[in-house]
Image: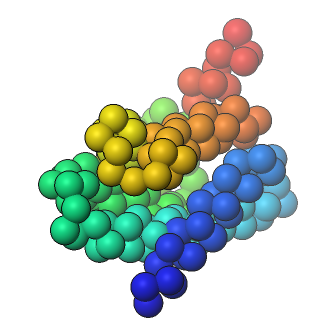
């Protein structure tokens, strides 16, 4: 178990980063394009679960070190990843046939997406802050500290560059303008 959690974290992180470089086309639920989009997003779930396990293993391995005093930051990171997992499962496994509202009110699918976005924000804040503190206070190897600080923002930034277009979204309206 001691080696399984870090391995899960590495596997999840590598999968997460690889997914960022191969975004699919988007289509509304029921279309052929949506099948690839749905599969791509469903692959996020095991990647996020593995990342969660890796961060949990890191937290458990640091019980008696100075880094353990910042369990709050790691809990923020784990809470953010939990929200990301729940939002992803709700959006692409449970409510996958529900159409997006496209700005016409809120539906359960939009709520799942917002949970994912909130989780992303919490995970970025937790990992970046913890990573920067680890660099300054030398809690772990420097490369690992920088990985904590930069990995989540870098992959989220890569995902935001994906050419996915959702009708009614801000990016779609800006593209048409």
Q: Residue furthest right?
A: 32
Q: Is residue 72 left or right of residue 96?
A: left
Q: Position of residue 101 (x, y in %)?
A: 50, 43
Q: Position of residue 129 (x, y in %)?
A: 33, 38
Q: Residue furthest top?
A: 177
User: Which one is nearer the viewer's eye here, 113 or 146?
Assistant: 146
Q: Is residue 42 left or right of residue 19?
A: left
148, above or below 61, in the image:
above
User: Which one is nearer the viewer's eye here, 76 or 82?
Assistant: 76
Which quadrant of the structure image shows residue 42?
bottom right
Q: Residue 165, can we see it?
A: no
Q: Position of residue 66 (x, y in %)?
A: 20, 55
Q: Residue 127, can we see it?
A: yes
Please name the residue shown 79% across and 61% down the image: 36
Which quadrant of the structure image shows residue 106?
top left
Which quadrant of the structure image shows residue 151?
top right
């Amino acid at each position: 178990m001691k080696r399984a959690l870090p391995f899960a974290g590495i596997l999840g992180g590598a999968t997460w980063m690889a997914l960022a470089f191969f975004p699919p086309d988007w289509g509304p639920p029921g279309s052929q394009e949506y099948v690839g989009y749905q599969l791509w997003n469903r692959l996020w779930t095991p990647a996020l679960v593995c990342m969660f396990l890796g961060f949990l293993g890191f937290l458990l391995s640091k019980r008696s070190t100075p880094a353990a005093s910042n369990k709050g930051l790691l809990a923020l990171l784990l809470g953010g990843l939990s929200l990301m997992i729940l939002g992803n499962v709700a959006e692409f496994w449970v409510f996958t046939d529900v159409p997006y509202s496209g700005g016409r009110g809120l539906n359960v699918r939009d709520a799942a997406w917002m949970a994912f976005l909130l989780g992303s924000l919490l995970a970025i804040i937790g990992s970046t802050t913890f990573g920067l503190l680890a660099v300054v206070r030398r809690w772990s190897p420097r490369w690992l500290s920088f990985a904590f600080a930069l990995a989540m923002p870098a992959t989220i930034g890569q995902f935001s560059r994906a050419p996915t277009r959702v009708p009614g979204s801000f990016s779609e309206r800006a593209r048409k303008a």
